[in-house]
Image (tube, helix red, strand yellow):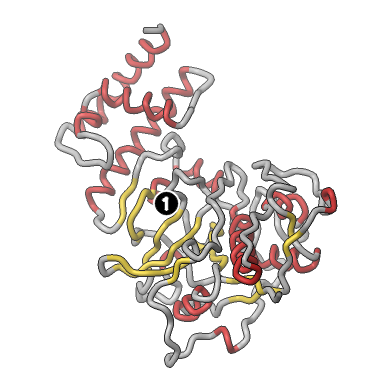
Amino acid sequence: MSPNKLLFLAAGFFLSSLFIGAYARDFSIVGYTPEDLTCIDKLINLFESWLEKHSKKYETLEEKLHRFEIFKDNLKHIDEKNKATTNYWLGLNEFADLSHDEFKKMYLGLKVDDKMPRRNESPEEFKYREFEALPKSVDWRKKGAVAAIKNQGSCGSCWAFSTVAAVEGINQIVTGNLTELSEQELIDCDTSYNNGCNGGLMDYAFAYIVSKGGLHKEEDYPYLMEEGTCEENREESEVVTITGYNDVPANDEQSLLKALAHQPLSVAIDASGRDFQFYSGGVFDGHCGTDLDHGVAAVGYGSSKGSDYIIVKNSWGPKWGEKGFIRMKRNTGKPSGMCGINKMASFPTKTV
């Protein structure tokens, strides 16, 4: 065993004494045994296995010890939450060595401000009426209108991924072709009101796509996970167009479902709650506010074991959640919906 590993084990034993003392009882955690949480050797081995699984490396032993402490605290939260909830559960994903403050700074990026009026008021046809019958469930993934899960990385570009998911969806519905489009072009070029990796808003991005006559394909303008130089005419390659966009009436879940029955939507949520960082499965009905800070895409809705939900496509990679997706509870009785999902939904329009 290397000297660094021995030193890490010794330091971990010292730093973990209080943790073990507080947890010297039976546990239940998804994927791990009670012994993994109460035995220092097993706890360190669990951390080492997690490092290997997610290809994590640290430059110094001090950094590794620091990340181990954060890992333990996150593990404690995951375990306690899994014992207290029944509809959803958390797990040790690739974000387990990040504090929640670090995670929020890196992965949330919706910016709502007053620089430009956002609301593009919807015509009456987009409002739900009581006599309208909606499908009991919709899943645009099964209809071929949802591309593979992507990973925004540590760039606050969720707004671009939300925009692209909605445009990919309506383009497939109208043309029959599921074409993956470029978030990077939006990050690099849509700078009048949006701010690249420092956040943005989906409606601004829809307006940009209309004004520029389309958006390039992902393969022609690939994602860099950082801001780059705008190349709107990159190789004069093919673009996908939209004709406009509309906003779903705010705080009106039935109108949101009506719109969602026709196509995927861009939606905004409050994802600042700690459970979002480690969500692993189930119908999420945990604590969250309505201060919108994350752009995602609604791609369907349904029910499971008495729980109604909206299917949401995220941009944190396929290892997060249910292969990159989260089911968020609907019919909460609150106009704004779970985590504010009903507050600011919008969608692009396209004619043949």
Is residue 80 placed above or below 48 in the rendered structure?
below
Q: Quadrant of residue 204?
A: bottom right
Q: Quadrant of the C terminus?
A: bottom right
Is residue 180 placed above or below 40 in the rendered structure?
below
Is residue 105 placed above or below 132 in the rendered structure?
above
Residue 299 visible in rendering? no
Q: Quadrant of residue 115?
A: bottom right
Q: Residues within 10 Å of mark 1 (few under 14, many from 20)?
A: some
Percent x, y for residue 123? 62, 86
Percent x, y for residue 48? 38, 24
Q: Quadrant of the N terminus?
A: top left
Percent x, y for residue 248? 56, 77
Q: Residue furthest left?
A: 25
Q: Which residue lies furthest to the front in this view?
A: 176
Side of 287 relative to 195 (left or right): left
Q: Which of 235 and 293 is in front in this view?
A: 235
Q: Quadrant of residue 311?
A: bottom left
Residue to which mark 1 is pinned: 276
